[in-house]
Image: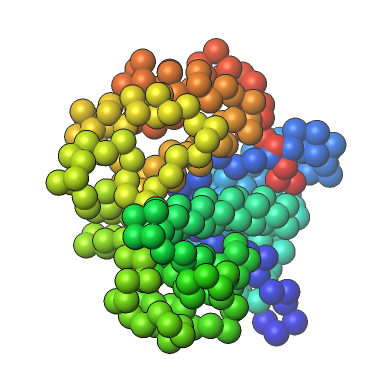
Amino acid sequence: MNDLPTPLTPADCDLRDFAFLPLDVVRLRDSDLAIHVTGEEFRCAVLLWCASWHQVPAASLPDDDKTLAALAGFGRAVGEWAKHRDGALHGWIKCSDGRLYHPVVAEKAMDALKAKLEQRWKTECARVKKHNQRHGTDLQIHDFDTWVSLGCPQGQVLYVPGTGNASPDDKSVNDAGHSGDVPGNPPDSPDSVPGETHSKGQGEGQGQRNIKDNPHPPSGPGWQKPDWVPADLWREFEALRKKRKKPLTDRARDMAVAKLQALQDGGHDVKAVMEQSILHAWDTFYPLKSDAAPAAAEAWSDAV
């Protein structure tokens, strides 16, 4: 496999919490796929794009006909899948990890991954800002690109007070996830920002601290709501989740905001989307019912 190209998305590219695959209507309509393959092959191709979005790495598929047959809607009928394989796999390429990748789906996956990491980075920035406000410190977090290059550390992330961002060469996070080896910032010092509690899986069990200070916090510790999300509706949504005994963790908040962002990018009014979920006591956000047809059309935006 040495002559095969490098995988088009990172091995840990996981978009299973992203419900929407962005596609381009015009690009799809005018593509070779839409013009030259059969209707059945086109159907299989669309199903495979969707399946690849929630594979890990995202935008990839296993090069295995039994699995591909199932993902394309043929179940165990591998022979029937074989009749449509070439057209259904139009545009897919095999990479050095032995998996199949679609360049355009991979392009969209990388955009979604960046958006996901940017939201996580903003959460870290908010945590550090809150720490500085509480303790009168002047800790700085890495810029986004440096933070990504360090492996997207969460919790104990940086920090030389008053000197700006540390360089990528500064070992601000050790393998255990605690700050150390940064001059003037030993582990457990007052200039270390406490990390999140991971008594459960990543993102679970959060939002349990500071209960004595505020038994009904509107959002989790260190989590900051984006300015474009209406504050009053967000509080109502949080209260609804809590009433249904499904309180939001910080990770769940990030996922909910990502859904709102995707719906907004698709032309939906965020306020109306949130009001709809509150009205129907839904646990998450969905396209507006009155916009079902436009939403379905926009769901096919860019993966040929």
Spot occupied by residue 18 in the image (x, y as percentages of width and height): 50, 45
Q: Is residue 191 left or right of residue 114?
A: left
- Residue at image position (80%, 33%) is 26
Observer-nearest of 299 and 173: 173
Residue 105 shows up from this direction: no
Spot occupied by residue 70 in the image (x, y as percentages of width and height): 50, 50
Colour scheme shown = rainbow
| Direction front: furthest residue | 136
Find residue 166 and report its image quarter.
Answer: bottom right
Q: Is residue 42 left or right of residue 146?
A: right
Q: Tell me if residue 178 comes above or below residue 36 in the rendering.
A: below
- Residue at image position (63%, 33%) is 265
Residue 291 shows up from this direction: yes
Observer-nearest of 240 and 108: 240
Q: Is residue 210 left or right of residue 253?
A: left
Q: Quadrant of the N terminus?
A: bottom right
Spot occupied by residue 130 in the image (x, y as percentages of width and height): 39, 53
Task: Tell how many labels.
Answer: 0
- Residue at image position (85%, 36%) is 30
Q: Tell me if residue 160 comes above or below residue 216 in the rendering.
A: below
Spot occupied by residue 94 in the image (x, y as percentages of width and height): 68, 68
- Residue at image position (26%, 61%) is 197
| Direction top: furthest residue | 290
